[in-house]
Amino acid sequence: MATSEQASGGINAHPMDQFVIKPLFGGHDVGFLTITNQTLWLAIAVLLVVALMVLPMRNATLVPTRMQSAAELLYGFVRKMVVDILGEEGLKFFPYIFTLFIFILISNVAGLIPTSFTTTSHIAVTGVLAMSVFLTVTVIGFARHGIGFISLFWVKSAPTVALRLVLFFIELISYFVRPLSHSVRLAGNMMAGHAVLKVFAAFVPAMGLFGIIPIGAMTGIFALELLVACVQAYIFTILTCVYLNDALHMH
Amino acid sequence: MEGDIGNMGQYIGAGLATIGLGGAGIGVGHVAGNYLAGALRNPAAAAEQQATLFIGIAFAEALGIFSFLVALLLLFAV
């Protein structure tokens, strides 16, 4: 887009500027190993996970402290979800699923801190997460069922063979679209929320005294964003469990 | 894109792409409404279908997000 400084009524910052990846230590090109603001916030997410989940569980007591109780609640929540969908044998995959859940939850919520950078709003990050889920599920499916894994796409309940052939291709395509929708859902939700916040923020100086109205709207949208951050982490995890269940138990 | 025709095309395309969000609203409302209707008839069985409710809402919402993504891409990434 052309000049954004002279846009309507004094927008000084482009709503999409917050998603730009900039190198942290000067220079303009983002190479393969450049330390960027995304690197920084990914590292901060990992440190937050350690500080909020790992450290309180050191010297865990039977009567929990507050942080320990919060960590245990999250653990129990994800464990219940895994056992509900995958059964008892799904607990083999619990470390991976819990890692996904906690990383996405803390990255999403850390992006809500003012002046921070939402790492999960980039397809680069969520695409890798979704691709790893897809590869995990496919490899586990083939390891568990051998070549019979293909029978996941062969719908036995359709009446004629021609219909089953058409459905085979439809099922195949929808299987390969899964990582796409998995990643875009998370990235799109995060990006949309933050872009809307920035657009409302651009209204505030333009409205002068009535700028209190966009501020009220931003507060409401911020609460919605907090809910969306937590729900999207939950959705990502529960869909991972559902895909894994498909591969393990084949309908 | 350069030129005024290009910019105009961007804006019109982005505006048209947001029509898809109406479908997302209808879809999510449909899922949530059906869950509510079922839950009011059979409250005991409602709690265990909450996970299905959230999955249904996520799938319906995702398609709306795709159309919003197309709008954003047209505006800022072309």
Image (cartoon, rainbow, N blue to C red):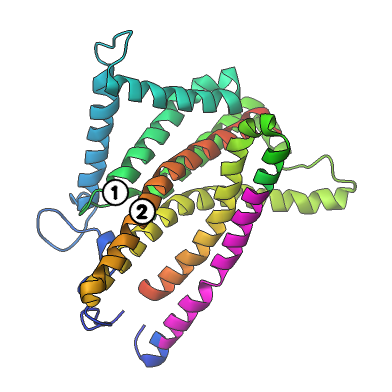
* Rendered position, B61 above or below A85: below
Q: For marks 2 and 1, give the one nearer the viewer.
A: 1
**Mark 2 burial class by Cα count in 10 Å: few <14, some 14-19, many 20+:** many
Judged from the image, the secondary structure of the residue bearing numbered disc 1 is: loop
Q: Is residue A215 visible?
A: yes
Q: Amino acid at mark 2?
A: Ser
For disc 1, the marked residue is A111
2 and 1 marks in contact (CB < 8 Å): yes
Quadrant assignment, res A64? top left
Q: Which residues are magenta?
A: B8-33
Residue A192 location in percent, x, y? 40, 60
Q: Residue at x 52, y 66 (%)?
A: B67
For disc 2, the marked residue is A121
Between A40 and A165, which is closer to the camera in this rendering? A40
Q: Amino acid at mark 1?
A: Gly
Quadrant assignment, res A31? bottom left
Return the disc, 2 or 1, that comes first in the chain's sequence: 1
**Mark 1 burial class by Cα count in 10 Å: few <14, some 14-19, many 20+:** many
Judged from the image, the secondary structure of the residue bearing numbered disc 2 is: helix
Q: Is residue B78 visible?
A: no
